[in-house]
Amino acid sequence: MPVNLTTIIDLIRYGASRFGAAGLTFGHSYDNALDEATQLVLHALHLPHDINPVYGQAHVTVEEKKAILALFERRIAERIPAAYITGEAWFAGLSFKIDARALVPRSPIAELIEAGFQPWLGDRQVQRALDLCTGSGCIGIAMAHYQPHWQVDAVDLSNDALALASENVLRLHTPNLRLLQSDLFSALDGERYDLIVSNPPYVTRAEVAALPPEYAHEPELGLIAGEDGLDLALKILRDAPAHLEDEGLLIVEVGEAEHALVELLPEIPFAWIEFKVGAMGVFAIGREDLVAHHARIRELADAR
């Protein structure tokens, strides 16, 4: 055991160096070695994530150091994302329970939620909202948390994911959210919404095969969407008009599949959203535009 590591900041620096030397991949809530090392150190010490930096100079005990180094070794040996080790991930300023039943929350849609979906909603009044492919429940629960006057439905195909989402509903106290098991819209006959938000699977089979080992800990059901990543997105575009109010808005994340979608449907006026870090493959589109181009969308979706 290294003997010269005595303070919290010593261990964070050491962990980040070890992670860098091991060639780990980051991108599950945290995008760099220093932040993941910090997360693991604070978890081992039972300290809050927003602790005052002055405590970085605090000394750790021998037993605390052993616990921290054990987490570092597990992160390196198993290539498991830190969020799965700690069982916690932060999304839209909220703490979610997370485990291998669902993807680690990391969607840029968090930024939209905290901004009240403006300017994209405009003066639309939202009474009912839908989170399609909810996974851990992060998007739907965050919407329900920040907009307590909305009635939010959150659906997923995976019963395992819904079980995790139900734990997060209790964790974050969102009585205005309802969880439903559904293959996209299949169990939502007659349900209509003012806003539909979805972060569906959008990774191609080839991309999944090439992903770093960290991603192998996540359920494939939450990642793969055919040869071009658009199998689910096209079905959402096809079926959304039947579940949107006349002035309703659809927001969908398709990531790198943005280019394939624009190539398939160049005539559709997708509004690609810019985030603080730039473009992230998330579009907004109104019901009227989906209806106007429904025939072409249906043709492509039906062929999947």
Image (cartoon, grey):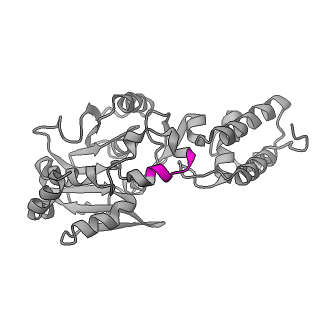
213 sits left or right of 167 in the view: right
Q: Say which residue appears at 84% left-offset and 32% top-offset.
A: 61
Q: Position of residue 142 (x, y in %)?
A: 39, 44
Residues drawn in magenta? 208-213
Answer whether residue 54 is magenta in the image: no
Q: Is residue 207 found left or right of 176 in the rendered image?
A: right
At 78% from the left edge and 48% from the top edge, which residue is drawn? 14
Image quadrant assignment for residue 300? bottom left
Rendered position, 160 above or below 218: above
- Residue 110 visible here: no
Return the residue nearer the eye: 8 or 65.
65
Looking at the rendered image, the quarter that the N terminus falls into is: top right
Image point (68%, 39%), residue name: 77
Does residue 237 show up? yes
Q: Nearer the viewer, residue 257 or 89?
A: 257
Horizontal and vertical percent position of residue 291: 10, 60
Q: In the rendered view, does 113 fall on the left or right side of 287?
A: right
The answer to whether residue 102 is left or right of residue 123 is right
Please name the predominant secondary structure of the magenta segment in the image.
helix
Residue projecting furthest to the right: 3
Quadrant of the rendered image containing residue 160: top left
Image x and y of residue 185, in percent = 19, 41
